[in-house]
Image (spheres, rainbow, N blue to C red):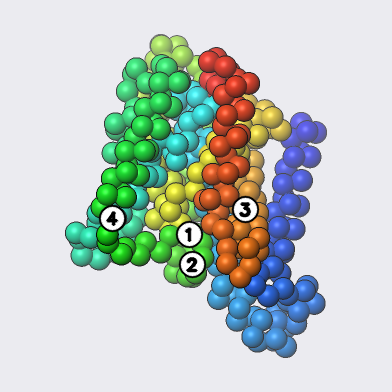
Amino acid sequence: MAKERTAYIVICIALIITAMLALMLGTQFYSLAQLWQALTGHQPAILSTVLTFRLPRILAALIAGGMLASAGAISQSVFRNRLADPTILGVTSAGELLMLIGSLMLPAFAFQKQLLALVGGLVAFALLANRKTLRQPYQLIIVGVALNLTFMALTQLFTKGINVSTSLGFNGITWSSVYSLLITGFIGLVAVLLMAPWANDLKLPDEQLSSVGVPVTAMRLGLLVLVVYLSADVTAVAGTIPFIGIIVPNIARYFVGHDYQTILPFSMLSGAWLLLAVDTIGRIVVLPSEISAATIMAVIGGPFLIILVQRGGFHGIKAR
């Protein structure tokens, strides 16, 4: 209990410090004194920069990070596999493909990107989730990676020779996108907390759950829909950001144990911190240009995944 409490305190402090640094750092550095002067109306130019560019980006990264980490943790519960994650299983790349096709073939309508990303994610899970892959963790990952590469290749095929602006990533994100992400993210994260007991129930064998009247299939499908919903919303705003859903829940298990009612809220906070930290680093490491959060996460996540597989072995990657 003391370890869990300490972990929550540390991650909350890290979130506050990182958010402050993200407000200060950029193409132009602002000190805490300058930020305070801006808030009190003495530096309108700084206040405009912060409110127009930095604050929406910070909020979007926080919300998206929490959603992706939660989606990864729930995926690992549903598939009983510590390597399961919407990005590595092709869910987000399928969403990007549907978004691209929709932008080329359909007239614009409200929540177009969100709906198309959701449909794409559902298609990917329909192709992925069957009894055989659910029983074989490594087969699940192999099929998921194959689907991911297929959807990415199809996206490249559709965009070859065509100038398509997807407006993905956090650079230049607008308040309208932040409001959309905030609303959908709040709904999704509340649903995550309410459905956390289901994730714990799925640790038990399906036969044992069915024998006591637990609707296993309905629970699993409900959680899968929630995973697609969370990842689709982030994909619609920022594109595919890999590995957060793998890294964060596995680290959360080390600090707060294997109860999903503690893993999920800790993963929300940790995912929010990780994506904000990565995005902030990407903004300042090659000034005046920047490196996307997706690129940095790919560099971090690849070695993490390799180490996790090598240390875990076949049975070690089964989630508890």
Residue under pointer 1: 169
Q: Nearer the viewer, residue 300 or 261?
A: 300
Spatial distance from mark 3 to mark 1, Cα to Cα? Answer: 12 Å
Residue under pointer 3: 278
Residue under pointer 2: 173
- Left or right of 6 on screen, residue 195: left
- At mark 1, the secondary structure is loop
Please determine whether, in this image, residue 287 is positioned above or below residue 292: below
Contact flag, marks 3 and 2 (Cβ < 8 Å): no
Spatial distance from mark 4 to mark 3, Cα to Cα? Answer: 30 Å
Spatial distance from mark 4 to mark 2, Cα to Cα? Answer: 25 Å
Residue under pointer 4: 160
Point out residue 230 in the picture as x, y percentages from the top left corner: 44, 46
User: Which numbered disc flags the more N-terminal residue, 3 or 2?
Assistant: 2
Contact flag, marks 1 and 2 (Cβ < 8 Å): yes
Query: Considering the image in quadrants, where does the N terminus appear?
Result: top right
Residue at the image position 65 percent from the left and 34 percent from the top: 251
Residue at the image position 44 percent from the left and 65 percent from the top: 177
Please determine whether, in this image, residue 183 is positioned above or below residue 136: below
In the image, which is nearer the foreground, mark 4 or mark 1? 4
Spatial distance from mark 3 to mark 2, Cα to Cα? Answer: 16 Å
- Name the residue type under label 3: Val
In the image, which is nearer the foreground, mark 3 or mark 2? 3
- Name the residue type under label 4: Lys
Q: Nearer the viewer, residue 82 or 101?
A: 101
Of all residues shown, which one is farthest toward the front?
A: 161
- At mark 4, the secondary structure is loop
User: Which numbered disc flags the more N-terminal residue, 4 or 2?
Assistant: 4
Total of numbered circles in the picture? 4
- Name the residue type under label 1: Gly
State whether residue 50 appears in this view: yes
Badge 4 crowding class, 10 Å Cα cut-off, few under 14, some 14 to 19, many 20 or more, is: few
